[in-house]
Image: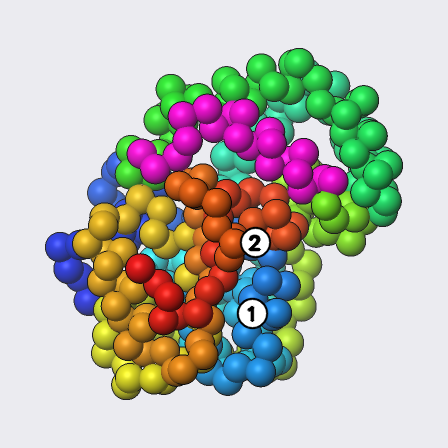
Amino acid sequence: MTSSLVTTGAQTPWVAGRFDAKVSGRKVLFGRMYEDSAIELDAFRGAGRVLCIASAGCTAMTLAPHHEVVAVDVNPVQLAYAAQRFAGGPPVRGSAERVMDAMRFFAPLLGWWPSKLRRFLDLDDVAAQADFWRTQLDTRRLRWALGLAFSFTALRAVYSSRFLDFLPRRLGAVFHQRLARGFSHSPNRTNPWARALLLGEMSTDVPPPEVKQVQLVHADAASFLEAQPAGSFEGFTLSNILDGATPAYRARLFSAVKRAAKPGAKVVLRSFGEPAEALASNLAAQDRSMLWGVVDVRPAGELA
């Protein structure tokens, strides 16, 4: 594990290492990743060296057998956790999991009993899933609860304003739409992200032998890429690091990516926000984690 952290005036909120507005005490934010790395495997087919955000290490573990992987993270606690997972350590529940655990605690009040959810998650026919969702899970109480849980009044108790300002105003309704879309798209039985979302199951991924070759770097992504030789990467998966970032940081990151990209390099960039306009490159509907408004997959040279 190496460190090349550079601080600048145009930071992202992720540098604090926590979701709230407190200024000390970084934490493991994610015990697992809620990103369907099948998107990256398809986007980076045939590529060599790729950059990813380390987070909980899930994407790096998926990519390692196929690519030379550099995994960066601005949060040293999160990076150390990824290293532990690469060494075979058990998953832990991060801040994100604890927030979702609190929401799931009230699920039985909606009629979402664990036994019912397990029956739903055992389905492998999307038509049957859509019917189960419509008749047994998608109730008025659910929509009311989502509106309450994802209201900005409730979210401000957990998240700093920088993690909220870019989100759509009626987030509960938007999240409801994403769930309905996801359950009608992919079979539940083979979707580990559905089980993580509804039951809180952690990742059971076994680190592949190639994960020993992953280079872990404590770094801000833009700073790291600015220090790399031009044309040194063939793929970039940047998670949702621009959620809450300033326009200056966005411009700086895109400039650094384009400089570090080999011709033909692809970029995968996610956001919890909704796209400002319809994007042909938005694969959010294909991401089985069901959480994202944007999963933008495009050539690095088209970033703007």
Measuring 64% from the left and 35% from the top, which residue is drawn there? 179
Q: Residue at x 22, y 43 (%)?
A: 23
Relative vertical location of residue 248 with respect to residue 300 in this rendering, above or below: above
Q: Which mark is residue 122?
A: none
| Residue drawn at (25%, 68%) of the image | 255
Which circle's residue, 2 or 1, is located before the other in the chain? 1
Q: Nearer the viewer, residue 199 or 34?
A: 34
Q: Is residue 273 visible?
A: yes
Res. 43 mark: 1
- Local packing at callout 2 (Cα closer than 10 Å; few below 14, some 14-19, many 20+) is some
Examine the image and state in which quarter residue 215 appears.
bottom left
Question: Is residue 177 covered in magenta?
Answer: yes
The residue at the point 71 percent across, 23 percent down is 138
Q: Which residues are magenta?
A: 165-184
The residues tagged by marks 2 and 1 sit, at their Cα atoms, a distance apart of 11 Å
Q: What amino acid type is highlighted by mark number 1? A: Ala
Residue 230 vertical position relative to residue 269 in the rendered view, above or below: below
Q: Main secondary structure of the magenta part?
A: helix
Residue on which disc 2 sits:
283
**Label total for image:** 2
Q: Is residue 33 above or below residue 80?
A: above
